[in-house]
Amino acid sequence: MKLDRLIARHEAMGRQSAHLAIASGRVRVEGTVVTDSHHPIDRFTCVALDGAVIQQPERALYLMMHKPEGILSATKDATHPTVIDLIDDQDKHTLHIAGRLDRSTSGLVLLTNDGRWSKRLMAAEHKVPKVYLVETLEPIALDAVAAFARGFYFHTEDITTLPAELVILGERQARLTLHEGRYHQVKRMFHRVNNRVTRLHRESIGSLALPADLKAGGWRGLDAAAAWAILAL
């Protein structure tokens, strides 16, 4: 939203009157006078007119969790426990998940109530890397590295996956870096090289790695600066 729209709506004045109020220095955003009518704001922004707060900022939440196997990446479910059930915060009902994991997959999950952040984080065009530790049923063929780098065509979505980096760590273990998050993507990619994923664990998203001291089922908050820094690659 633009600043002039908020002022006009809150004060029941026309856009022209809102422009004049802003241009004359009567409006502060986060405590600083702003004279640009098109200054962007959102529901997390504190706005004051003539010294009186006209928009109290909502509390922005950015959380990281070590999701255990068997927990759903969902906000609610009638049958199975969800990641939200593991969180003890009065505002947890406002959260959504930025990058889901399958029920059988463990590792780093991010939750937020800031839609701008989650959209930027998960959009394929921003190519935010997600790193997974993969274990497989069969030995991983050496030519799988080149196949993952070329990408795979998924006819259901009519897309070809972005190049992915596969590093073979052992006979049945690899580290995989993706820059997108398609439905069951890791499992489908390994199926294309005649293998099956038996265990999958997400180690990092962007610049944020799952902390070694964050136990399965645990979570902790991130401040806004740290959350947005995840995208700065």
Image (cartoon, rainbow, N blue to C red):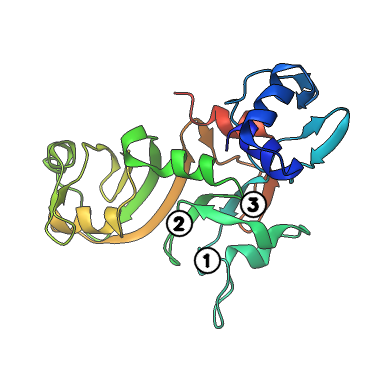
Q: Judge by depth and name the residue closer to the eye, 92 or 68.
A: 92
**Residue sitting at x 54%, y 83%:** 79
Q: Residue 207: horizontal and vertical position, in percent? A: 50, 30
- Label 1 environment density (alpha carbons within 10 Å; few <14, some 14–19, many ≥20): some
Residue at label 1? 74
Q: Residue 148: horizontal and vertical position, in percent? A: 18, 41
159 sits left or right of 177 in the view = left
Residue 41 in sight? no
Q: Judge by depth and name the residue closer to the eye, 22 or 40.
A: 22
Q: Quadrant of residue 164?
A: top left
Q: Which of the image's four quarters has the N terminus?
A: top right
Q: Secondary structure at mark 3?
A: loop
Identify which amino acid the numbered label 3 is placed on: Lys
Q: Are marks 1 and 2 in contact (CB under 8 Å)?
A: yes
**Residue sitting at x 67%, y 54%:** 218
81 sits left or right of 128 in the view = right
**Residue sitting at x 12%, y 42%:** 147
125 sits left or right of 87 in the view = left
Gap in angstroms between the C-alphas marked 3 and 1: 20 Å
- Label 3 environment density (alpha carbons within 10 Å; few <14, some 14–19, many ≥20): some
Residue at label 2? 100
Q: Judge by depth and name the residue closer to the eye, 180 or 57.
A: 57
Gap in angstroms between the C-alphas marked 1 and 2: 8 Å
Q: Are marks 3 and 2 in contact (CB under 8 Å)?
A: no
Residue at label 3? 215
